[in-house]
Image (cartoon, rainbow, N blue to C red):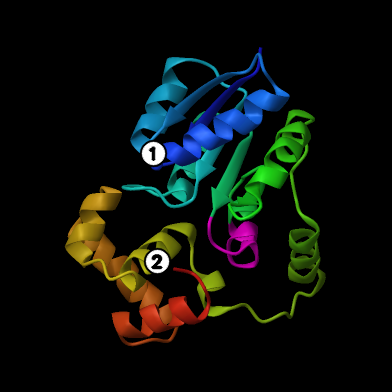
Amino acid sequence: MMRILIADDHAIVRRGLKQLILEEYPSAQLAGAKDTEELMSKLMEEPWDIVICDLNMPGRSGLDALHQIRLSYPSLPVLIMSMYPEDQYALRVLKAGASGYLGKDNIHEDIIKAIHTVLLGKKFITPSVAEKLAQAFGSKNQELNLHEKLSDREFDVFKLLAGGKAVSDIAEQLSLSVTTVSTYRARVLEKMNMKSNADLTRYALNNSLI
């Protein structure tokens, strides 16, 4: 019996995915988690075959959850889903160890194909992501977008700053000290050659990152 854990802060999304999956795998055992903390707790309680995780959840992000899963359960397939364009996020999550990236706009079409693919031990990659991967690795001299220079933790901090979060709020959300978050903010601004949070917000909006 296949066991799938779905992490998303919206109950209607979890319910919709369960319905789609049960149509193809009626005997599958499915469970949900509303945030990263509940996801990690359920992973520790019993074994799972696949995790489907939203990129943006309250508290720690799906990217943060992915890093934790890779450390504790390196062979567990993780599919990351998001409302944001795959050309901005897919490469980052694949490099971080995800088994695939699912855009929520097309998830009803891709979810079963993705599950089939990862159960075979392969990565689920759409044609557009495959093209972007080829471009990214085909030219060593290709210029990176500014946000692609950030580490995954810096990227999480960048998105929160761009979304209007205060340093103290980010520290609480990511379970970091205010000093540590301030250090990340300084690194983000330096790497992206920007001077203020307003600059980060403008960049994020222009590049469909928030």
- Residue drawn at x 38%, y 36% is 34
- Residue 53 visible? The answer is yes
Choose between 39 and 27: the one closer to the eye.
27
Q: Residue 83 at x, y = what percent?
A: 53, 57
Q: Residues within 10 Å of mark 1 (few under 14, many from 20)?
A: many
Q: Earlier in the sequence, mark 1 or mark 2?
A: 1
Q: Are marks 1 and 2 in contact (CB under 8 Å)?
A: no
Q: Is mark 2 on a helix, strand or loop?
A: helix
Circle 2 residue: 159
Can residue 75 be seen here? The reply is no
Q: Main secondary structure of the magenta part?
A: helix
x and y percentages locating residue 67 in the rendered image: 49, 43
Picture quadrant of residue 50? top right
C-alpha distance separating marks 1 and 2? 17 Å
Badge 1 element: helix
75 in the magenta segment: no
Q: In which quarter of the image is the N terminus?
A: top right
**Amino acid residing under circle 2:** Lys
Relative height, residue 163 to residue 206 (above, below): above
Q: Mark 1 points at which residue?
A: 36
- Crowding near the residue tagged with mark 2, few <14, some 14–19, many ≥20 C-alpha atoms within 10 Å: some
**Residue span colored magenta:** 83-92
Q: Which residue is drawn at 72% across and 36% down?
A: 112
Q: What residue type is labelled 1?
A: Thr
Q: In this view, does 53 lie to the left or right of 188?
A: right
